[in-house]
């Protein structure tokens, strides 16, 4: 069973609340050139369709600052500007209407951070203090020898003090490292030291398989212990995949459910249907659905009927054919080549019925 979620203070990013009693918020970051407004908006629209609730864009120069104003007008979710080194870009992004600024105070002088804080305060927006193992303050790095969990936490606490001294409390925190254990330890320590909401992520996690594993372990283990208020899965892929993985992590921990849960067997020598083809087709066809019925695709009659019966809709394969179950009842036998379509149709019917009942 999940540990009780650690209560943090709620912080707003536009209309989205992060922390407090709010559910864990899923966010992502675009990988387009922010200055290309059309491409960036198109990617954000795809991210929203996948369930992204807050989006961050990189703001590397003045042209990107201008682009932010146009992007903000054309999207329906809060926009965060990701700023490094140059406080003027943060000030410009704030003027242009972003809902939150993400800075890494380790790569900016204190008086410049102070000016960003003043501007955010005047506009009533929040700031994410993003501590990253790759850019810790020099004195902290020298003292700890390497970007250990303790070094990350020391940097975060030092920056929190600075923000609090300026009477700014609309803070979210992230301590990210590509080393999963350092990220876990740092977030555990930070959640004990402060009640600001935590943004969880494993930075530079890598490709789909290795990145998914690292994110699932790092983010998942912390969420399981009740730590974390918003998550960003980072993958070297289309960010839509990041959002999908984020929801699978939340589903696995029974924290949030979005989209059908597809249960499929790995197949073995008993399988007599082309299960991988069927399951891929089913997954693609159901990917736009927000409801979360359980859908089973099983290869044979050994475990198949049992799992298929447990699901809301399921099929179990046989020689060149399969049986379709709905809510535990056997509906009919179907030839293999019609199996995927029959399953997809049944799931859609079920979702429509549920939507009609409201
Ligand atoms: Fe093998 Fe059947 Fe189990 Fe699939 S359901 S793994 S085909 S025994």
Image (spheres, grey):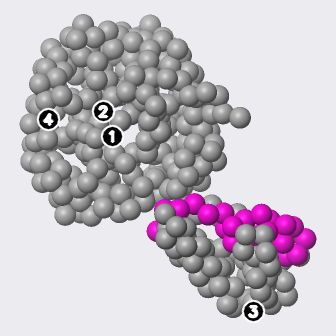
Q: Residue at x 79, y 88 (%)?
A: 333
* 324 over 243 or under it: above or below: below
Q: Nearer the viewer, mark 4 or mark 2?
A: 2
**Cα distance, mark 3 to mark 2?**
53 Å
Give the alpha-carbon distance from disc 1 to disc 2, as whole Å: 6 Å
Question: Is residue 247 positioned above or below 343 on the image?
Answer: above
Q: Are marks 1 and 2 in contact (CB under 8 Å)?
A: yes
Q: Position of residue 256 (x, y in %)?
A: 54, 47
Mark 4 vs ligand 1: CB under 8 Å? no
Q: Look at the image and tell me whether residue 82 can be seen.
A: no
Q: Which residues are magenta?
A: 288-314
Q: Element at badge 4?
A: helix
Mark 4 — residue?
A: 94
Q: Which SS class for mark 1? A: strand
Q: Secondary structure at mark 2?
A: strand
Q: Tell me the crowding category of disc 2: few under 14, some 14 to 19, or many 20 or more residues within 10 angstroms, Cα based.
A: some
Q: Is residue 216 left or right of residue 323?
A: left
In this figure, which residue is indicated by the disc labeled 3? 335
Q: Is residue 297 magenta?
A: yes
């Amino acid at each position: 069973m999940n540990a009780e979620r650690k209560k943090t203070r709620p912080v707003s990013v536009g209309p989205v609340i992060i922390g407090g009693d709010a559910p864990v918020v899923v966010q992502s970051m675009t990988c387009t050139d922010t200055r290309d407004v059309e491409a960036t908006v198109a990617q954000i629209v795809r991210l929203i369709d996948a369930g992204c609730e807050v989006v961050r864009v990189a703001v590397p120069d003045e042209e990107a600052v201008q682009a932010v104003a146009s992007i903000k007008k054309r999207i329906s979710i809060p926009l965060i500007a990701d700023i490094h080194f140059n406080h003027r870009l943060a000030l410009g992004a704030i003027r242009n209407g972003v809902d939150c600024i993400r800075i890494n105070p380790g790569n900016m002088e204190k008086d410049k951070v102070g000016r960003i804080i003043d501007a955010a305060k005047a506009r009533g927006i929040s700031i994410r203090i993003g501590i990253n193992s790759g850019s810790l303050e020099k004195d902290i790095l020298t003292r700890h020898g390497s970007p250990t969990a303790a070094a990350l936490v020391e940097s975060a606490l030092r920056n929190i003090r600075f923000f609090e001294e300026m009477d700014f409390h609309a803070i979210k925190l992230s301590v990210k490292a590509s080393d999963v254990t350092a990220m876990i330890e740092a977030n555990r320590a930070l959640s004990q030291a402060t009640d600001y909401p935590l943004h969880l992520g494993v930075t530079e996690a890598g490709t789909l398989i290795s990145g998914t594993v690292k994110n699932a372990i790092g983010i998942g283990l912390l969420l399981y212990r009740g730590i974390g208020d918003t998550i960003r899965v980072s993958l070297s892929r289309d960010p839509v995949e990041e959002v999908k993985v984020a929801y699978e992590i939340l589903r696995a921990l029974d924290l949030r459910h979005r989209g059908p849960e597809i249960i499929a067997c790995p197949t073995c020598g008993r399988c007599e249907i082309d299960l991988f083809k069927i399951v891929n087709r089913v997954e693609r066809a159901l990917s736009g659905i927000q409801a979360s019925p359980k859908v089973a695709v099983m290869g044979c009659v050994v475990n198949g009927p049992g799992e298929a019966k447990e699901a809301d809709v399921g099929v179990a394969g046989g020689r060149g054919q399969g049986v379709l179950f709905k809510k535990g009842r056997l509906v009919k036998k179907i030839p293999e080549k019609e199996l995927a379509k029959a399953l997809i149709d049944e799931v859609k019917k079920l979702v429509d019925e549920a939507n009609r009942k409201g």
